[in-house]
Image (cartoon, grey):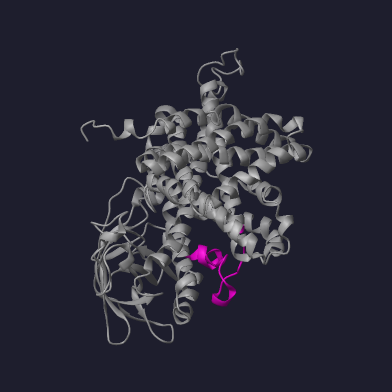
Amino acid sequence: MPTYSAPLKDYQFLINHFLGLERYEQVKGFAEAKELVAPLLEASAQLCEEVLFPLNRVGDLQGLKYSAGTVTTPEGFKEAYKAYTEGGWSTLTWPTEYGGQDLPEFLNMPMLEMVCSANLSFGLTPGLTHGAIHALVAYGSDEQKQKFLPPMIAGKWSGVMCLTEPVAGTDLGLLKTRATPNADGSYAIEGNKIFISSGEHDMTENIIHLVLARLPDAPKGTKGISLFIVPKFLVNDDGSLGARNKFVCSGIEHKMGIHASPTCVMNYDGAIGYLVGKPHEGLKAMFVMMNTARLYVGVQGLGVGESAFQNALSYAKDRLQGRALTGAKQPEKAADPITVHPDVRRMLHTMKCFTEGSRALVMETALHLDLSHRHEDPAVREAADDFVQLVTPILKATLTDGGFETASTAMQCFGGYGYIEEYGAAQYLRDARIAMIYEGTNGVQAMDLVGRKLSYDTGRYLKRFFHPVDAFIAEHRDDPAMAEFTKPLKIHTKYLQQATMWIGAMGLANPNHAGAGAVEYQKMFSLVLYAYLFARQAKLALALRDQDPEFYDQKLATCRFFFAKLLPQTTGLLASITAGADPVMADAGF
């Protein structure tokens, strides 16, 4: 049976050492947050390990029950959601004026990963609510904030985004849902939405839908889209719930994975809605929600990958098959554990590189997200936001690709037993696959990177990455202990810069050149980004080794494997990128 144990020691290392929080003691909330690291990590681990994780298999096997527009979640989910909200986990990062704790995002990310590791289906509902709150904080009116935010932050109400329609997926300019003004200032919403995660369920007393729709005078395309609050139950002036709104869940999808997460078809039949922000500017608010969601979906990939890796490692240590190539390691037993075999060790190392590199990227991004909102210096806020804008598509695509690949690799470690449901590896593989698709497919993320982020303000975003990397290399140029990391980092950073210049120059002449190499470029960028993060971890591991030799020796082994076995992939990616668009666009019958 599957097991899960929260990676507390790695998070303590990242928060207490890697992030360098001592540089930001003056930032609002940071000093207080450091005091909460240990108790928050321990409490979140307890909830995820003891409450959420035991329901993961239950949710996968039982699934959801749909009847006449209502959705019932699997046994235990409603009670688990109550435990989650009563523990205050839904309130961590939000303003105190609406009932939040106003803690930094870098304290929220560990909990988010643990939830996704323990029970991804469960985690989608609070995750989507988090994104909806972001949009309302940024664009809601004062009245809307006072009415909707406190119960959403408290977890009494949940929130969802409603974008996709049968004819409008990635191309939102095609959406047809209509919003007609009512005499009282509200709007009548009519239309159909599909793939609405948590659009209907029984875990909260109200569900706040944020719906994209067109006003009667809306121009065509994305410039004619507005955003509306459409609550499941209308809210009275005193905050109590009123009549049921005029929309219904007409069905739920039967999916490959995340069986306990309701993916709903929603029909709006004159439902009452309230305009968020200005008319025809709904995408601005929605992208606030989507950018947050893309970071969170990336963490979903990491969370599932961590659980898959843990179970593969546990199995590999116990599974006896064959003998080590250099002679028996446990001659008293019938065979050696499969951890002695080079190929199994390659798989385990690769999975560990993914989880530890991705976790460092998530925490680095969370820190910059906090600085972009909390730092007093406008220049620091701008630089931090630039970093977040640059890495968001990389993080979403890399962590979700990697989560699925790690789940697949974990299954390979199990051998035939991995293909049998009771061992759990199959569920991780099935659950992980969706994250590569929703909130913008990973191909869309790659196109965002090459099409928008590279050229922004003559390469301003890129400078937020390349300049710190160059400075790190220069700082450690004469340190012999760091040479095994800084020398390859310098070489492969140059390769990435070559690819960047090629895409910039050739993409201007023919956009297909940029499009054809976008996915490879995103992968290449992620390898160099991880190399930078691993080099920084290696520096700390060398300095701190005497405090915990076992932990830091293992950390160094992971760093060394990445630089020796994974980072060299950049050379092949560079060759593929510079091959251009002709092989891709050639007529092959499609």
Taking depth in this image into account, of 33 and 212 the one nearest to the observer is: 212
- For the image shown, how many numbered marks are present on the structure? 0
Q: Is residue 352 shown above or below 88?
A: above
Taking depth in this image into account, of 257 and 180 the one nearest to the observer is: 180
Q: Is residue 262 left or right of residue 239?
A: left
Q: Is residue 572 left or right of residue 70?
A: right
Q: Is residue 54 left or right of residue 463?
A: left
Q: For the C terminus, which image quadrant?
A: top left
Q: Is residue 520 shown above or below 328?
A: below
Horizontal and vertical percent for residue 319?
51, 26
The structure residue drawn at horizontal position 56% and vertical position 13%, both measured from the top left corner, is 325
Q: Is residue 21 shown above or below 471?
A: below
Residue lying farthest right? 546
Horizontal and vertical percent for residue 544?
76, 40
**Can residue 144 be seen at all in this image of the molecule?**
yes
The structure residue drawn at horizontal position 38% and vertical position 65%, both measured from the top left corner, is 283
Which residues are the magenta region?
82-107
Horizontal and vertical percent for residue 173?
29, 60
Residue lying farthest front? 509
Horizontal and vertical percent for residue 555?
66, 36
Q: Would you say residue 105 sits in the magenta stretch?
A: yes
**Can residue 304 be seen at all in this image of the molecule?**
no
Q: Would you say residue 346 sits in the magenta stretch?
A: no
